[in-house]
Image (spheres, rainbow, N blue to C red):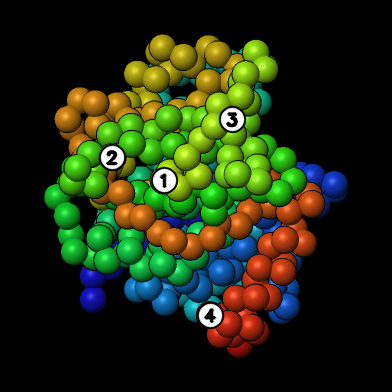
Amino acid sequence: MNDVTLVIMAAGIGSRYGGGIKQLEAVGPGGEIIMDYSVYDALQAGFTKVVFVIRRSLEADFKEIIGRRMEKICRVEYAYQELNDLPPGFALPEGRTKPWGTGQAILACRGLVREPFAVINADDYYGAAAFQKVYAYLAARPLATEYCMAGFVLKNTLSDNGSVTRGICSVDADGYLCKVEETRNIEKTAAGAVARSGDGSVRTLNAEACVSMNMWGLMPEFLDILNEGFPEFLKQRGQEMTSEYLLPDIIDQLIRQDAAKVKLLKTPDQWFGVTYKEDKQTVVEAIARLIAQGKYPARLFG
């Protein structure tokens, strides 16, 4: 069996809405949270280890609520994303409170991840098909500069309760990613989807377009690329209060430099997430339907 690791970016679980931590809201009949379903799907697909990227200040609560349960069913390790975890020669700018982004989150896994790995957000439901496709790609042991990304159909990723930001994908004739266009203020409409810009203009979007939901399949050598690139990022933008070292930007740069290829793996699954407080009931109902269809047991882990 080829080892493949799942990295779950959970350092942002302090994000709150209505007084609760949205990533730890129960959505399943047995008190399961969205992360439970991601881990279940990953283990069913063949993943052999889970690495949670968290903040040290939330370590005790995180382990109490989810970590210790997961440790009973699979190999679990923890990486820690901290604002002041910077390369030698750099200091945290006074007043900076915003995390450094998904690139730094994955960089925190250096030393823990030595095998191909997938990256997901803690608060997104991706569906079994996405995990199966990404695992199959990574288990085949591609070259060190060959990655993959799960591509979701735009119409399957929209919220009924407000606008969202999505990365709209362009691919070449062979199905490799050319670019990801970050598109903000996307709203669901009766006809599909539109994007509203700051000047009030409205652009109609192709509801069948593939979008990125930050589910990447990467090789361990990618951690060295992150490690080399972070100081350069800090030199250029480290004094900004809101700048972020982001995976899509890093991977886009590698594609443009012909330093990496990213295979788009299209998945038909419906994405769920709790972007807005009102989304929770939608997720609860969707999980209930999947259980009724036999796709999940009523209680995931016994």
Hey, which quadrant is residue 48 in on the image? bottom left
Q: Are marks 1 and 4 in contact (CB under 8 Å)?
A: no
Q: Is residue 242 above or below residue 292?
A: above
Q: Earlier in the sequence, mark 3 or mark 1?
A: 3
Amino acid on which disc 4 is placed? Lys
| Res 300 seen here | no
Q: Earlier in the sequence, mark 1 or mark 4?
A: 1
* Alpha carbon distance from label 2 to label 4: 31 Å
Q: Secondary structure at mark 3?
A: strand
* Alpha carbon distance from label 1 to label 4: 24 Å
Residue at the disc numbered 4: 295
Nearer to me, 130 or 228? 130
Q: Is residue 25 above or below residue 225?
A: below
* Alpha carbon distance from label 4 to label 3: 33 Å
Q: Residue furthest left?
A: 143
Which residue lies at the image location 58% right of the left edge and 40% below the top edge?
193
Which residue lies at the image location 47% right of the left edge and 40% below the top edge?
206
Q: Earlier in the sequence, mark 3 or mark 2?
A: 2
* Alpha carbon distance from label 3 to label 2: 21 Å
Q: Residue furthest bottom?
A: 302
Residue at the disc numbered 1: 210
**Horizontal arrangement in the rendering, residue 225 relative to residue 9 (left or right):** left
Amino acid on which disc 3 is placed? Ala
Q: Position of residue 81 (x, y in %)?
A: 52, 41
Q: Are marks 2 and 1 in contact (CB under 8 Å)?
A: yes
* Alpha carbon distance from label 2 to label 1: 9 Å
Q: Residues within 10 Å of mark 2 (few under 14, many from 20)?
A: some
Q: Residues within 10 Å of mark 1 (few under 14, many from 20)?
A: many
Q: Is residue 87 above or below residue 54?
A: above
